[in-house]
Image (tube, rainbow, N blue to C red):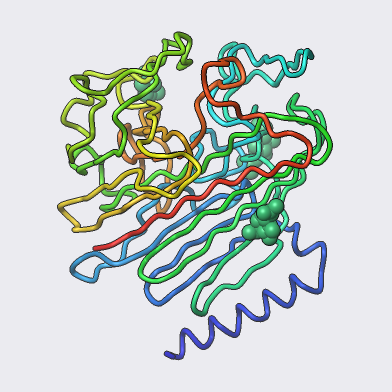
């Protein structure tokens, strides 16, 4: 072990024992690094947010391949959704309203007349408790916990939520999210909203990255980004077809994500939901870096950072539209208002489980 690593390992033990001894320390907002050799992931318990992912390229040059901000304070008022977990129900809910067991629920409205990403103060804007933190060794990880209360942003029932980020060899980042309905039935649909740019977070746009999606179908969205038709349509013959590796930019100007140009689309992942299966593969020819995503959710949202517009980023960088891509595994959007989609209702005592594995390489 190099001297730097020894120092880090010692620091890690100090942090971990401070956490174990002190309940308040677990709730203090902090930055937690998971390190394995030259692979490093930084996380904050503000919004269960991934702040950075650093790895080499084929020439050995290290780069941070996720977009974000330098300090946790800058995430507090951030509206770009750099890296957090979204919930209790991610994506949009039409008119912030749904009916469950005969009762009408009204949610916080924060996107036109609809609810987006669980409301203005969703899981991305709360402090999570650090349950466990192991910063180095064979498989460094952090487990974050949040108790969402009955009525929070309008959702019914108390809900226990855990998110674990785990780093393992070679250059693998695992995300495990679970939720337990403690007293009432409630919809649950979490997602992880990291923006990736395999060339490095300030390296320009991702239009040249080649993307393959294991998805032959998608849910067309309307101008409000809602699946109002309830249709599931084939991607064949549309600019949404990424079944063969295709540059993200090849047809991007033909698609609208609401009012802006670019992908903001929900795909139905091929294969059996509930099982880990390949979702996507992305490759940046220039740096030689690649990312493979596996997941167990029914769907995945492809978002190409269409709303970034000279947005302030880390290290003095400025991000413009298409500066990154998000691959957010999830349930069907607005499923609470679409009985034709698989249900997202978690009954009292039931457990929701969501797994993602990002396999990076170069
Ligand atoms: C966030 O915005 C509020 C309201 O505008 C402001 O009072 C606060 O200082 C801001 N916080 C940060 C960390 O910028
Ligand atoms: C949820 O995840 C946490 C952390 O990984 C784990 O400790 C807990 O047992 C899980 N809960 C359930 C109900 O599976
Ligand atoms: C980007 O910002 C500029 C300057 O504020 C503004 O004029 C333009 O309309 C914005 N573009 C989008 C797509 O929001």
Above or below, comparing residue 9 to residue 29 in the picture: below
Image-based side of 80 in relation to 344, left or right: left
Q: Residue at x 37, y 66 (%)?
A: 171
Q: How many marks?
A: 0
- Residue 270 lies, in percent from the top left, at 35, 36
Give 205 or 298, whichever is nearer the viewer: 298
Q: Quadrant of residue 95?
A: top right
Q: Is residue 315 visible?
A: yes
Q: Quadrant of the C terminus?
A: bottom left
Q: Quadrant of residue 102?
A: top right
Give 349 or 288, whichever is nearer the viewer: 349
Above or below, comparing residue 240 to residue 34 in the picture: above
Of all residues shown, which one is farthest toward the front?
Answer: 272
Q: Quadrant of the N terminus?
A: bottom left
Give 174 or 14, whichever is nearer the viewer: 174
Image-based side of 3 in relation to 142, left or right: left
Above or below, comparing residue 240 to residue 136 in the picture: above
- Residue 41 lies, in percent from the top left, at 47, 62
Q: Quadrant of residue 132?
A: bottom right
Q: Residue at x 69, y 21 (%)?
A: 108
Image-based side of 229 in relation to 104, left or right: left
- Residue 183 lies, in percent from the top left, at 84, 37
Image-based side of 236 in relation to 10, left or right: left
Q: Residue at x 76, y 64 (%)?
A: 25
Q: Residue at x 33, y 18 (%)?
A: 233
- Residue 337 lies, in percent from the top left, at 60, 15
Q: Quarter for ligand 2? A: bottom right
Q: Is residue 144 visible?
A: no
Give 181 or 350, whichever is nearer the viewer: 350
């Amino acid at each position: 072990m190099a001297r730097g690593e020894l120092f880090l390992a010692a620091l890690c033990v100090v942090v971990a024992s401070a956490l174990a001894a002190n309940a308040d320390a677990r709730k203090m907002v902090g930055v937690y690094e998971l390190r394995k050799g030259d692979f490093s992931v930084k996380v904050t318990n503000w919004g269960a947010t991934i702040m950075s992912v650093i790895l080499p390229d084929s020439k050995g040059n290290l780069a941070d391949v996720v977009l974000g901000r330098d300090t946790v304070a800058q995430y507090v008022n951030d509206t770009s959704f750099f890296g957090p977990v979204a919930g209790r129900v991610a994506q949009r809910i039409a008119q912030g309203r749904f009916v469950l067991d005969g009762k009408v629920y009204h949610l916080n409205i924060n996107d036109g007349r609809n609810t987006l990403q669980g409301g203005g103060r969703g899981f991305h804007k709360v402090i999570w408790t650090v349950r466990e933190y192991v910063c180095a060794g064979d498989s460094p990880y952090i487990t974050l916990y949040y108790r969402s209360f009955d009525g929070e942003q309008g959702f019914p029932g108390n809900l226990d939520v855990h998110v674990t980020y785990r780093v393992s060899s070679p250059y693998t980042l695992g995300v495990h999210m679970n939720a337990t309905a403690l007293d009432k039935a409630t919809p649950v649909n979490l997602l992880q909203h990291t923006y990736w740019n395999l060339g490095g977070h300030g390296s320009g746009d991702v239009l040249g990255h080649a993307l393959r999606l294991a998805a032959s179908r998608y849910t067309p969205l309307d101008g409000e980004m809602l699946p109002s038709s309830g249709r599931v349509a084939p991607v064949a013959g549309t600019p949404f077809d990424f079944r063969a590796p295709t540059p993200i930019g090849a047809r991007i100007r033909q698609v609208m994500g609401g009012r802006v140009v670019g992908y903001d689309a929900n795909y139905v992942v091929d294969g059996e939901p509930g099982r880990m299966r390949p979702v996507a593969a992305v490759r940046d020819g220039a740096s030689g870096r690649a990312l493979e995503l596996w997941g167990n959710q029914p769907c995945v949202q492809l978002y190409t950072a269409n709303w970034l517009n000279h947005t302030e980023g880390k290290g003095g960088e400025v991000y413009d539209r298409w500066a990154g891509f998000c691959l957010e595994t999830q349930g069907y959007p607005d499923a609470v208002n679409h009985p034709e989609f698989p249900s997202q209702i978690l009954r009292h005592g039931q457990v929701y489980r969501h797994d993602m594995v990002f396999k990076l390489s170069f």
